Image (cartoon, rainbow, N blue to C red):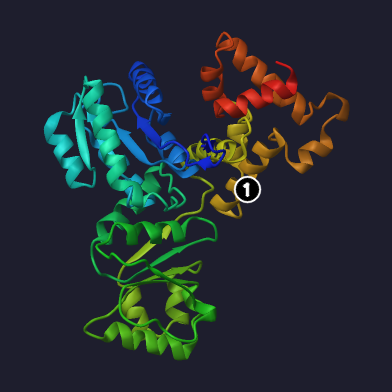
Amino acid sequence: MNAIRNESGESAPPAPCLLFVDDDRDVQVAARLLFRRSGLDILSAHGADEALTQLASFPVDLVLLDLNYTKGMTAGAEGLALLRDMLVLRPDLPVIVVTGHSGVTIAVAAMRAGAVDFVMKPWNNERLLALVEGTLKKCRACQASEAEPALIVASDDLRRTVAEADRLAVTRASLIITGAPGVGKMLLARRIHALSYEDDPAVMLRAEDCEALPEGRGTWIFRNIEALSARMQRRLADRLDARVAPRVIALSSRDHANLEDMLDPRLMLHLGMVGLTLSPLHGRADDIVALSAHFLRYFAARHGLAEPRMDESRLRLLCEEEWSQNVRGLRALVERAVLTGTWETASEEAEAVPNTALTLRDTERSLIETALRKHGFNVTQAARELGLTRPALYRRMARYGL
């Protein structure tokens, strides 16, 4: 969101940015007209994954949250789950529930889960605007924090692991999270801490560099717990034996059997009581599809570029890839695709016929021209499809003479 200049030529702060999550496009249009007339920027999301991407990509000040996104759903479970995930990313984020089918009971449940207020559909424009502006004014001091990277969950395997982590989050139990490099162990650890009753930030520790333990209790997240020296393992076991002990979330790329051989038996009694394992990305096709879409939207917004087209053949190749670096490798590949405008890897480019390859400039111009023609040269709609802001699209139109 760009800052504007006031009459004295000084930069004025950017307009507050709202995110409206609702699958009804007519409702989205009505909200956009209402808030933009009042000088507020507004982003749209039509489901949970898109909402998390927008929240990770833009400095959102407030969320308007519908509770149902799948046709026929009226229970509000989708919205309540999304509310929890958004507050994991941004604990101080003000969320106003906008509900129709779910009714007042679910709206009250959402407030107990962290929403600041609710409004019923169809809303009164003046009342909704007053509620949003009043909420922004109250929460303005809390808008500096950035969102944590989003944990995108689509496969049944990962859903089960995350559900167990959420169940354990409210306890004081120490635990071990295992899994190959790049599967998201740190993201899961941060989620557990965010959903706990601990107010203070977690202390991050690299076991190989640890020469002293923090004071107090709180939550300590240890990377590569197996690299902790024998002396520090004994000290950590002593701390966990105390009546008032810290909560330790240990991360390791080793499996449970290896850890039993590498860690002090007394320490392992504490840490090994509860274990969570994140499986490799390869074989989790649903997560690969969801993560690819998330990273495409995220990096297109971050770099101000169009999303390269994802066809069925490319998606199939992604799902068949081994992913030795797991989510980290997929993230890097998608960012490269956004930056270069093509999905081709270095080996694919070497095999391609040079004269038939489109340049990045040609590809971007073609994408923009196609989107503009599709929407009758409606810049707002074309920008939304391309994942660009209106000013960014205007700059590219000028660059290519469109």
Q: Residue at x 47, y 51 (%)?
A: 149
- Vertical relation: 261 (above or below) 62: below
For this orientation, the residue located farthest to the left is 105
Q: Residue at x 81, y 27 (%)?
A: 357
Q: Label 1 sits on what residue type?
A: Ala
The answer to which quarter of the image holds residue 370 is top right
Q: Nearer the viewer, residue 52 or 123?
A: 123
Residue 124, how many percent across, how many down?
21, 21
The answer to which quarter of the image holds residue 45 is top left
Seen in the image, is 127 located left or right of residue 249? left
Seen in the image, is 295 located left or right of residue 60? right
Give the structural element (helix, strand or loop) at label 1.
helix
Q: Nearer the viewer, residue 60 or 71?
A: 60
Residue 353, how many percent across, how many down?
86, 29
Task: Categorize mark 1 by other alpha carbons within 10 Å: few (<14), some (14-19), many (20+).
Answer: few
Seen in the image, is 285 located left or right of residue 120? right
- Vertical relation: 231 (above or below) 162: below
Q: Is residue 79 visible?
A: no
- In the rendered image, which residue does mark 1 sit on? 332
For this orientation, the residue located farthest to the right is 355
Q: Is residue 287 visible?
A: yes
The quadrant of the rendering that contains the C terminus is top right
- Vertical relation: 367 (above or below) 160: above
Residue 293, how many percent across, how many down?
52, 35
Q: Nearer the viewer, residue 139 or 73?
A: 139
- Vertical relation: 197 (above or below) 357: below
Q: Residue at x 33, y 62 (%)?
A: 193
